[in-house]
Amino acid sequence: MYAHYVYDGLRRRIIKNVGGVQTRYVYDNEDIILELNGSGVQQAYYSHGPGIDEPISIERAGILTITLQMGWGVL
């Protein structure tokens, strides 16, 4: 198996190819908002909070997953 990654000028990963399966990423500034397959078909949609890399929800295959963010030191 092999992996190949492509990054843009802002050092964001825009293409991932692992074992011949390609995923493309679409960004809104620093946040990933869409994952597309190699044919350009949407695979996932991300909703983000105010921070960098802080997804609030991810919708994939019609299933909405809500993420919970816990601060440092929270038990």
Image (tube, rainbow, N blue to C red):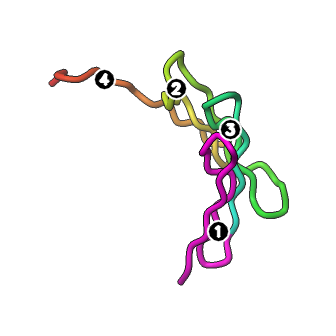
- The answer to whether the residues at label 3 and label 4 have Cβ atoms under 8 Å apart is no
Distance (Cα) linking label 2 and label 3? 11 Å
Q: Earlier in the sequence, mark 2 or mark 3?
A: 3
- The amino acid pointed to by label 4 is Met
- The amino acid pointed to by label 2 is Ile
Q: Nearer the viewer, residue 66 or 12?
A: 12
- The answer to whether the residues at label 2 and label 4 have Cβ atoms under 8 Å apart is no
- The amino acid pointed to by label 3 is Tyr
Identify whether 25 is placed above or below 4.
Answer: above
x 63%, y 37%: residue: 32
Residue 46 position, x and y percent, is 63, 34
User: In the image as oriented, which residue stretches furthest toward the front?
Assistant: 9
Per the image, the residue denoted by label 1 is: 17
Identify whether 60 is placed above or below 39.
Answer: above
Per the image, the residue denoted by label 4 is: 70
- The answer to whether the residues at label 1 and label 2 have Cβ atoms under 8 Å apart is no
Distance (Cα) linking label 1 and label 2? 26 Å
Q: Which residues are magenta?
A: 1-21
- The amino acid pointed to by label 1 is Asn
- The answer to whether the residues at label 1 and label 4 have Cβ atoms under 8 Å apart is no
Per the image, the residue denoted by label 2 is: 56
Per the image, the residue denoted by label 3 is: 45
Q: Does the magenta portion include 16?
A: yes
Residue 22 position, x and y percent, is 70, 66
